[in-house]
Image (cartoon, rainbow, N blue to C red):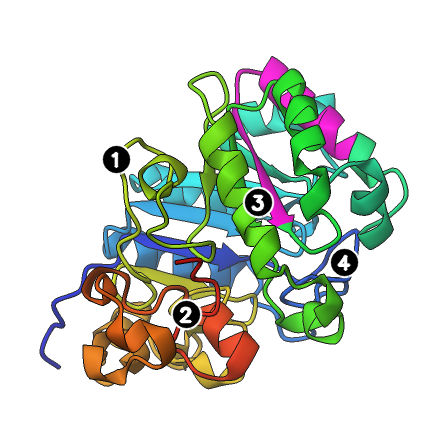
Amino acid sequence: MMPVPFRLDTVVWELTRACTFSCRYCGSRAGSPLPDEMGPAEQLGVADQLVAMRVRRVVLLGGEVFLKTGWERVAARLMEGGCKVSVITNGWLVDKAQADHLVDVGIPYVAVSIDGTREVHDENRLAGSFDRAVAAVEELHSHGITTAVITTMNHASAPTLRELHATIRDAGADVWQIQACTPFGNAAFARELVPTADDLREVVRLVAELSCPELPILAADNIGYFTPEESRIRGRRGMRFGGCSAGLSMAGIDSTGNVRGCEALYDSRFIEGNLRDLPLDEIWSDPNAFAYNRAFTLEKLTGICSTCEVRGRCAGGCRSMNWACHGDTNGSVTCLR
């Protein structure tokens, strides 16, 4: 098989579907582990594949990572091989002992999910989850771990984000990322939570206004594109959206070994192969894989994207949001131009 001209840089890896919650807007319907999840030995083998492919960055998530037996061995194997490893958690299991353990393992970066102020966060997760998530940020910060907050913004939480900003800042977070709720998984049955265009516009304004060196705020790749605030909302001043990277430089792995271009594309039609059948480098090198991006041409764009002056750079925006909202990867549903 001839090599393809795409280097795998970043992998988002769902270690388990087991979770302390089953949130109303969870994109993977986490809660209980799947019966055929990869075991510790299989996951160590996958880690070795990622190291061999010289993947630069691996994000470990769930479900809840800390419910997966052997997660720390997987993280250690990756880091020993030169991968930069980060963990995303809901914070419920993060106390001083867990933070001590993270330091011992050597995890340098942890993100905690906080999706709104106490009332809206707890309503969609579990009573008490907001306070424990904020406490987790404080504990991680006190241990010298670079700590992010990731907010999956939905229609109910959007009006609370300005108030949430002060809480996140005071807890000691180093960075805040806001992403839009995508109607996959549980959220497909709670579509009233999908943010509106007005919600997204408010997020863009908030990020542009409140982001500062003390608490950088960034809008994720499923929010906006090329509004007047574009150069101030993507993390670094002057940075602009460069198109969906699924299958071009990024891949997702789920707990049973399925490989997708992005873990947000939680639909079976986007599975490119399974690691129990083929090694990752063969799946990645298949010239027919990830066709929605690798075989993309501007002629495939639909709607307002087909005539937009920045279509060559944006290419229709986030594939997962487009697909989940109208079953087409080739036209943005979150463009605010």
**Along the polypeptide, which appears first: circle 1 or circle 4?**
4
User: Residue 139: where, in percent of width, then height?
Assistant: 68, 20
Q: How many marks?
A: 4
Query: What amino acid is labelled 4 in the image?
Result: Cys
Q: Find the magenta span and give its range.
A: 132-152
Looking at the rendered image, the disc whose residue lies closer to the viewer, 4 or 2, is: 2
- Residue 287, visible in the rendered structure: no
The disc, 3 or 1, on the residue closer to the chain's N-terminal end is 3
Residue 332 — which label? Answer: 2
Q: Residues within 10 Å of mark 2 (few under 14, many from 20)?
A: many
Q: Is residue 298 magenta?
A: no
Identify the residue under disc 1.
238
Q: CA distance from mark 1 to mark 2?
A: 22 Å
Marks 1 and 4, how far apart at CA: 35 Å
The percent position of residue 119, horizontal first and vertical second, equals 86, 41
In the rendered image, the vertical position of residue 84 relative to residue 265, given as above or below: above
- The mark closer to the camera, 1 or 4, is 1
- Residue 277 higher or lower than 244, as above or below: below
Q: Amino acid at mark 2?
A: Ser
Q: CA distance from mark 3 to mark 1?
A: 20 Å
User: How far apart, in angstroms, are the residues tagged by discs 4 and 2?
Assistant: 26 Å
- Indicate the amino acid at tag 1: Gly
Residues 204 and 46: in front is 204
Q: Are the residues flagged by discs 1 and 4 in contact, CB closer than 8 Å?
A: no
Choose between 231 and 110: the one closer to the eye.
231
Instruction: Work out how far the residue at label 4 is from the one at label 3, CA to CA, in angstroms.
Output: 24 Å
Left or right of 247 in this view: 327: right
- Of the two numbered discs 4 and 3 on the same chain, state the one appearing first in sequence: 4
Quickly name the residue at label 4.
23
How packed is label 1: few (under 14 Cα within 10 Å), some, or many (20 or more)? few
The numbered disc on residue 202 is: 3
